């Protein structure tokens, strides 16, 4: 090619361009194998040399290059350079372009601009090739400065937006290079003295750019847009030219596909900077863009995302909903950034659901929710929000027949979703049936805006309950129990809410097979001893066991319809769990067994020896003391349960009491007082064995008392000495002691045995014919013995006053001659004790040797716990009136431990104190419940302790209910028995004067809502025992339906509410369901236990139970001590 370097090319002027073109083409031609060895090849010039020679030729001989031929030459040269990987070739090609632009005319601008862009891109890829990028820009500047400047910018846009770019690597690289040149050099304010490309021109060009097809192109476009948005001058130009809308369209094209993180950051740095500059109409699109790339929505856009959906809903344009909601639903669901937006979208979608008539769209909406709920990657929070959609649809106008069919096909879907969603779980477990079998939803478990806020039964009505699939419900529950879900909150919702569902007996009428299926699942779980480990630090597996026991306890209430063998398995399961782990599950097992004793006495009788043996083994767990003893105390009142007990079983019970008494003595002092800094004063509840030790102490003595009274006569003889030994203890010095409570307990045992040997004494004992009566009062040990003797007839009435009670005996009134002749001297003996080998005798008259004339009284011997070595004869009542006053005072102290409890009826929809206290009647089942609490007693002139009820003018009503046995009495303050004054306020005040001062109140709650502890503000109410029907019952239903059911087929929920800080010890601290047949006895026992504990708690001295027996004991001891030193004493 020497010709190219010559200034004089004649005579080859016409062929120069063609020869140069051919040389470039030949250079790129494939080389054949046989030519590789040719030495001529070593002389072949490089492409850069050819291109340089071409540039030189054009520089000196441009006029000989025709436009068409020059175009072919340039195209061949650029094509050859684009195929090269040599940097010198790129430089040479750029020089060629620049030379042609300087010395001639570029025939076709696009190939040249394309190669410049390509070179710019290649130069920007690595730092060592930066000079190439600068060279490309230098050539571009020359073009921009020439007459081709405007065309150059347009050509760049053409290259960028060309849709055939992606089929050729060279063209694609050129497109990226064109973008880089534009972004780096041609934006306004980028380069001084360089014609810039207008922002709107660029954006319109980018609008046509096929960014969806290629990730690299999309990345660079996004970077350019981010740069433009951050540049004040460029952005202002866009605003002035109305280019923001087009910009958002381009951005949306970029973000709808996968985008590099760097590009995203750059783009959204610009967007967030300019948020306030966009018009309101742009904000929904901007919000959508943020969601597309899963970025947090700025506050200004938070409410704009759903604006188009709202608008479509208002304009009845449902096409948008039917075709587009699934896409947005997926976007909002697969990120945790948009819970509020997702919740709002679900609510809006539900509204659209009910407005559209397209059934297919409705189904698609529910299917979409279902798919997302069951998605493996969906978060728990999102699942709950999605489930709200199905829940809200189900809850829509539940009282309307129109939507019954919809609820029927939705309910199985809800049951399936329950495994994944707390919302769905709570809903399916909130289904209830009222007394008439009509459905409703327990709104306390489902918080939905669609549910009205009223209290009446109609507000939560669930029309078409009978058509819902209970099989689907049971299948879902069974599956959740046997295959616990991964989500603890779902599993916990089942554990917590299932008992309430089961207690709703009317709901399960006719579905007892399913109930037995649940029983089997629970029993299997408890038997396997493998439980879910709660993820919370303050919960253990024991929590799960407790909840399962609660469920099983509720299921046992279906004993009347379950196979007897299956009920036995449930009972055995509970017995086996008791004592097998820490104390908490054992407590609930004891509570469950308590319910079984009331509901299934004939069945429990066969397990009594096992139960007692199990309780005896729990004696090592001191935390169970209260619960074991309360269980035994209640058990002593079931005669049916005692028939099969052997003497060894009774001995175990007394042995348990002995063990607890020993434990109390070893850990605390009986005289320990609570101080103002104690837990009680601080309002902190504590049920630790140490803190409750004195209640355990009192309770153990009560159990001994109750069970001794329950013993058969033949069993007492063999156990009395053992029991007495349990009540004694030896101190560290070896001295034997009997505490006061033990002493009065022994006194009770002796009194009961003595009274069983004696015929009851008539009330009237003396007539005028008996003549003068001589009365003597004598004190021996802990007995005050009064003898009243008729001197004319010899009749003697002996009154024995002792801590545990007062008894009377009558001695024979025949003449001495008759008595001596008949040899019936024993008829002159009044026995007040049956202590074997411990009897002594007291003559009716001290001077009557051996009591042969007037008789004698058998008394405990001096070394007996009940006796003393001295007998004191008190002064005559006329000589010392103080004696009479002391005895009269003693007689006013009843031997019965008397307690009181209020009884309140709450009518339908009643929540206000005044409304409730003005009730003067209740439902029929309430009245039957009162009959089961005790016996009706007249108040006027009553001799029993009425606990403050008026006994003179019937101001508190004419009657009340009273229950008592040999040692305890419970008086009820029944508000419906109390009259209403003409002034309702005075009536309320009078009734509250009683129930407001009762530590324990029983509430028969028929309101249909939960009872609030603070309904009756009072400083003295510690415990409310709340009874409510197991199914919601209106007043009319109570009269027409409930009262026509047998008691054993009515069921009630019983729950004990305690004041904050007051220990919760009751078996009904969690709701228990019990039949109407057992309700009165169960509630009475709860009230008695609560009364005993409340007395001790209120006194602030847990070591001093205010026992009437001990009070009477103290009075006798004071009398003995007062006269011991100054009166005649019989040895």
Image: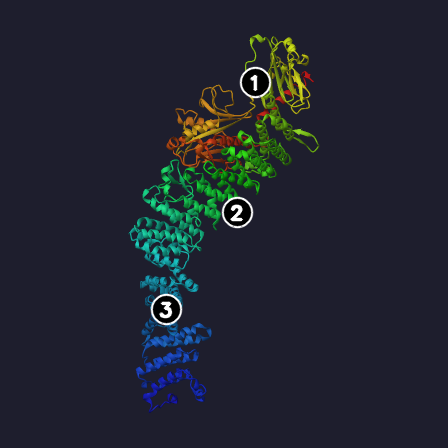
Residue of label 3: 187
Where residue 592 sits: x, y (%)?
Answer: 52, 37
Position of 478 compared to 195: left or right?
right
- What residue appears at the point 40 percent right and 74 percent down from the top-left corner? 120
Report how far apart the C-alphas of labels 3 and 1 lie in the structure: 119 Å
Which badge, 1 or 2, comes first in the chain's sequence? 2
- The tag on residue 531 is 2
Q: State the quadrant of the C terminus.
A: top right
Looking at the image, which is closer to me, 957 or 415?
Answer: 415
Q: Dividing the image into 4 quarters, which one contains the N terminus?
A: bottom left
Above or below — where is 777 with respect to 701?
A: above
* Residue at the disc numbered 1: 760
Residue 972 is labelled as: none
State the SS at label 3.
Answer: loop
**Colour setting:** rainbow
The front one of 1050 and 935 is 1050
* Dot 3 alpha-carbon crowd within 10 angstroms: few under 14, some 14 to 19, many 20 or more: many
């Amino acid at each position: 090619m020497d010709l190219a370097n010559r200034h004089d090319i004649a005579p080859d002027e016409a062929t120069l361009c063609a020869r140069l073109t051919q040389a470039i083409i030949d250079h790129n031609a494939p080389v054949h194998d046989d030519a590789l060895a040719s030495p001529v090849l070593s002389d072949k010039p490089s492409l850069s040399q050819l291109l340089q020679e071409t540039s030189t030729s054009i520089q000196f001989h441009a006029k000989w290059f025709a436009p068409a031929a020059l175009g072919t030459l340039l195209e061949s040269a650029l094509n050859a350079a684009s195929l090269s990987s040599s940097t010198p070739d790129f430089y040479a090609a750029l020089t060629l372009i620049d030379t042609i632009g300087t010395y001639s005319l570029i025939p076709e601008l696009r190939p040249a601009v394309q190669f410049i862009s390509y070179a710019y891109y290649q130069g920007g890829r690595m730092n060592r090739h930066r000079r190439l990028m600068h060279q490309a820009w230098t050539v571009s500047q020359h073009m921009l400065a020439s007459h081709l400047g405007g065309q150059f910018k347009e050509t760049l846009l053409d290259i960028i937006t060309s849709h055939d770019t992606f089929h050729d690597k060279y063209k694609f690289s050129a497109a990226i290079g064109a973008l880089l040149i534009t972004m780096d050099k041609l934006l306004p304010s980028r380069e001084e003295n360089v014609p810039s490309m207008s922002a709107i021109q660029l954006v319109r060009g980018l609008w046509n750019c096929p960014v969806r097809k290629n990730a690299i192109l999309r990345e660079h476009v996004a970077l350019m847009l981010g740069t433009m948005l951050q540049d004040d001058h460029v952005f202002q130009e866009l605003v002035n030219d109305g280019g923001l809308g087009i910009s958002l369209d381009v951005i949306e094209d970029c973000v709808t596909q996968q985008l590099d993180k760097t590009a995203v950051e750059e783009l959204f740095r610009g967007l967030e900077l300019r948020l306030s500059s966009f018009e309101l109409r742009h904000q929904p699109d901007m919000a959508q863009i943020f969601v597309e790339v899963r970025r947090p929505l700025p506050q200004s856009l938070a409410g704009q995302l759903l604006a188009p959906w709202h608008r479509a809903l208002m304009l009845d344009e449902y096409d948008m909903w039917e075709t587009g909601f699934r896409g947005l639903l997926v976007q909002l669901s697969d990120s945790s950034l948009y819970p509020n937006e997702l919740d709002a979208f679900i609510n809006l979608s539900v509204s659209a659901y009910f407005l559209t008539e397209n059934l297919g769209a409705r189904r698609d909406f529910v299917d979409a929710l279902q798919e997302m709920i069951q998605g493996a990657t969906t978060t728990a929070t999102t699942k709950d929000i999605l489930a709200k959609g199905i829940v809200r649809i189900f809850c829509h106008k539940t009282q309307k027949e129109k939507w019954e069919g919809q609820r029927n096909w939705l309910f199985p879907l809800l049951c399936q979703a329950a495994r994944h969603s707390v919302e769905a779980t709570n809903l399916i477990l909130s289904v209830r049936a009222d007394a008439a079998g009509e459905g409703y939803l327990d709104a306390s478990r489902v918080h939905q805006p669609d549910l009205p806020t009223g209290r009446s039964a109609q507000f939560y009505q669930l029309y078409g309950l009978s058509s819902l699939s209970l099989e689907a419900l049971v299948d879902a529950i069974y599956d959740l129990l046997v295959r616990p879900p991964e989500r603890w909150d779902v599993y916990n919702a089942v554990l917590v809410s299932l008992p309430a569902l089961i207690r709703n007996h009317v709901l399960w009428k006719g579905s007892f097979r399913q109930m037995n299926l649940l029983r089997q699942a629970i029993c299997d779980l408890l038997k396997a001893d493998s439980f879910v480990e709660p993820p919370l630090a303050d919960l253990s597996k024991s929590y799960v066991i407790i909840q399962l026991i609660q469920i099983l306890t509720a299921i046992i209430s279906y004993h009347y319809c379950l196979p007897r063998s299956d009920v036995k398995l449930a009972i055995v399961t509970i017995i086996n769990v008791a004592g097998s782990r820490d104390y908490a599950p054992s407590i609930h097992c004891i509570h469950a067994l308590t319910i079984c004793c009331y509901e299934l006495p004939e069945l429990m009788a066969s397990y009594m020896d096992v139960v007692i043996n199990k309780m005896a083994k729990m004696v090592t767990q001191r935390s169970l003391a209260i619960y074991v003893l309360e269980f035994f105390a209640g058990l002593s009142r079931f005669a049916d349960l005692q028939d099969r007990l052997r003497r060894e079983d009774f001995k175990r019970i007394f042995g348990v009491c002995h063990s607890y008494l020993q434990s109390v003595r070893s850990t605390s002092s009986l005289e320990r007082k609570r101080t103002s800094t104690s837990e009680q004063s601080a309002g902190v509840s504590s049920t630790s064995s140490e803190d409750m030790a004195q209640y355990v102490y009192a309770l153990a003595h009560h159990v001994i008392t109750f069970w001794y009274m329950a013993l058969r006569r033949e069993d007492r003889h063999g156990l009395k000495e053992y029991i007495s030994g349990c009540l004694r203890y030896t101190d560290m010095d070896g001295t034997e002691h009997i505490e006061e409570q033990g002493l009065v307990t022994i006194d009770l045992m002796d009194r009961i045995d003595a009274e069983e040997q004696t015929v009851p004494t008539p009330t009237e004992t003396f007539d005028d014919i008996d003549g003068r009566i001589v009365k003597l009062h004598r004190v021996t040990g802990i007995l005050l013995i009064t003898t009243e003797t008729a001197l004319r007839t010899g009749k003697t009435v002996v009154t024995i006053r002792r801590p545990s009670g007062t008894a009377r005996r009558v001695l024979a009134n025949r003449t001495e001659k008759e008595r001596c002749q008949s040899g019936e001297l024993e008829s002159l003996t009044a026995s007040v004790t049956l202590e074997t080998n411990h009897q002594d005798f007291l003559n009716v008259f001290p001077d009557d040797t051996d009591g042969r004339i007037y008789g004698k009284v058998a008394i405990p011997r001096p070394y007996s716990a009940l006796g003393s070595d001295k007998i004191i004869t008190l002064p005559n009542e006329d000589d010392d009136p103080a004696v009479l006053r002391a005895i009269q005072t003693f007689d006013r102290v009843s031997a019965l431990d008397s307690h009181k409890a209020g009884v309140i009826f709450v009518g339908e929809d009643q929540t206000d104190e005044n409304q409730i206290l003005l009730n003067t009647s209740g439902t029929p089942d309430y009245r039957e419940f009162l009959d089961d609490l005790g016996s009706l007693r007249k108040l006027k002139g009553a001799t029993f302790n009425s606990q403050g009820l008026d006994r003179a003018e019937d101001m508190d009503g004419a009657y009340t209910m009273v229950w008592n046995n040999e040692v305890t009495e419970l008086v009820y303050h029944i508000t419906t028995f109390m009259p209403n004054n003409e002034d309702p306020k005075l009536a309320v005040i009078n009734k509250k004067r009683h129930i407001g001062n009762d530590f324990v109140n029983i509430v028969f709650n028929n309101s249909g809502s939960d009872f609030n502890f603070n309904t009756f503000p009072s400083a003295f109410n510690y415990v409310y025992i709340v009874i409510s029907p197991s199914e919601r019952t209106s007043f009319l239903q109570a009269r027409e339906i409930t009262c026509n059911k047998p008691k054993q087929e009515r069921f009630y929920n019983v729950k004990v509410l305690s004041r904050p800080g007051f220990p919760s010890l009751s078996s009904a601290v969690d709701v228990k369901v019990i039949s109407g047949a057992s309700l009165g006895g169960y509630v009475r026992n709860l009230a008695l236990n609560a009364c005993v504990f409340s007395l001790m708690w209120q006194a602030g001295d847990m070591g001093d139970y205010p026992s009437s027996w001990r009070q009477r004991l103290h009075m006798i001891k004071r009398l003995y001590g007062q006269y011991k030193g100054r009166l005649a004493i019989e040895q």
